[in-house]
Image (tube, coloured by chain):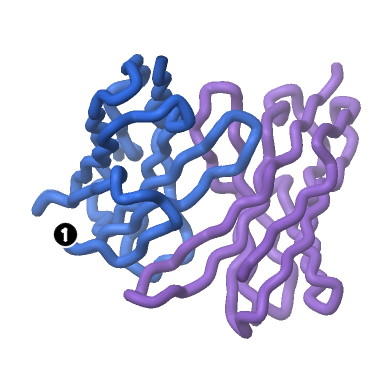
């Protein structure tokens, strides 16, 4: 079975622009979480979605938003990009909402110039 | 609030030897989970091992074992018989159930492991 997939792999944007990142979970997994990993640090939780509803949110500004589709895939949107948004954005899927094991995708590396 | 501390920014080990990566945590939650992930230079986080706070025995997965000492709030990862392919960043994480039913992990800053031939 295919693992978690993310697109695009790399992305370069300029300050003030908007970006959309995409994630497809492992088949059968209903929960998708998004993380931001700045260079030299561990991942920081942004959102968790389950059955198309937001079920958890980390300490990120409203410029960050996400949604989950009926096929459980998900998009992360970031508006009004700042230089500090440059990071690796990781998507993880799990079988259920409270599942204790998440499986990560390869990530999207976003560079904001 | 939860906190994960990994005090070793970098570790070196000879191939075929064992290595221990340290992790301490702080939480007031009675129930939690502890995880270790491996992140190669490609960026993908690879799940290695999980330990529940109520598990009596230390978790093991192949060459990986988690040395769980609840009273000391430590969850060290032991890799036996190191291989060159083990060279990567290793992250300790703690998960907790949050409002809304979500399960949120908090990650440490990571330890870079280099395995020498």
Residue at image coords 31%, 33%: A5
- Taking the image as shown, residue A86 lies to the left or right of residue B23, namely left
**Displayed quadrant of residue B25:** bottom right
Find chain A in the image and tell me its colour: blue
Question: Which quarter of the rendering shows the C terminus of chain A?
Answer: top left
Query: Which is nearer the eye, B73 or A57?
Result: A57
Q: Which residue is label 1 attached to?
A: A52
Q: Secondary structure at mark 1?
A: loop
**Displayed quadrant of residue B80:** top right
Residue at image coords 43%, 32%: A85
Residue at image coords 23%, 48%: A66
Query: Which is nearer the eye, A44 or A6?
Result: A44
- The percent coordinates of residue A96 (x first, y second) are 32, 65
Q: Which chain is purple?
A: B
Say if residue A93 shows up in the picture.
no
User: Vertically, is B32 above or below A106?
Assistant: below
- The percent coordinates of residue B72 (x first, y second) are 85, 72
- The percent coordinates of residue B16 (x first, y second) are 86, 31
Query: Which chain contains the residue that carries disc 1?
Result: A
**Displayed quadrant of residue B94:** bottom right
- Taking the image as shown, residue A17 lies to the left or right of residue B88, namely left
**Total labels drawn:** 1
Q: Residues within 10 Å of mark 1 (few under 14, many from 20)?
A: some
Residue at image coords 75%, 38%: B111
Question: Which quarter of the rendering shows the N terminus of chain A?
Answer: top left
């Amino acid at each position: 079975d295919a693992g978690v997939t993310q697109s695009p792999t790399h992305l370069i944007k300029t300050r003030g622009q908007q970006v959309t990142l995409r994630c497809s979970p492992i088949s059968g997994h209903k929960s998708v979480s998004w993380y931001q990993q700045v260079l030299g640090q561990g991942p920081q939780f942004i959102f968790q979605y389950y059955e198309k509803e937001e079920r958890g949110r980390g300490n990120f500004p409203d410029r960050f938003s996400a949604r989950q589709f009926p096929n459980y895939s998900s998009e992360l949107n970031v508006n009004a990009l700042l230089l500090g948004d440059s990071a690796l954005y990781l998507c993880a899927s799990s079988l259920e909402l409270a599942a204790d094991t998440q499986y990560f995708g390869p990530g999207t590396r976003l560079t904001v110039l | 609030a939860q906190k994960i501390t990994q005090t070793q920014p970098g570790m070196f080990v000879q191939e075929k030897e064992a290595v221990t990566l340290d992790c301490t945590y702080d939480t007031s939650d009675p129930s939690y989970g502890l995880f270790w992930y491996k992140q190669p230079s490609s960026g993908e986080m690879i799940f290695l091992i999980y330990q529940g706070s109520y598990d009596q025995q230390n978790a093991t997965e192949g060459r990986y074992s988690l040395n769980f000492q609840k009273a000391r709030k430590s969850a060290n990862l032991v890799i036996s018989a190191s291989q060159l392919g083990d060279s990567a960043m290793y992250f300790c994480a703690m998960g907790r159930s949050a409002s809304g039913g979500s399960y949120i992990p908090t990650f440490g800053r990571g330890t870079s492991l280099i395995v020498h031939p």
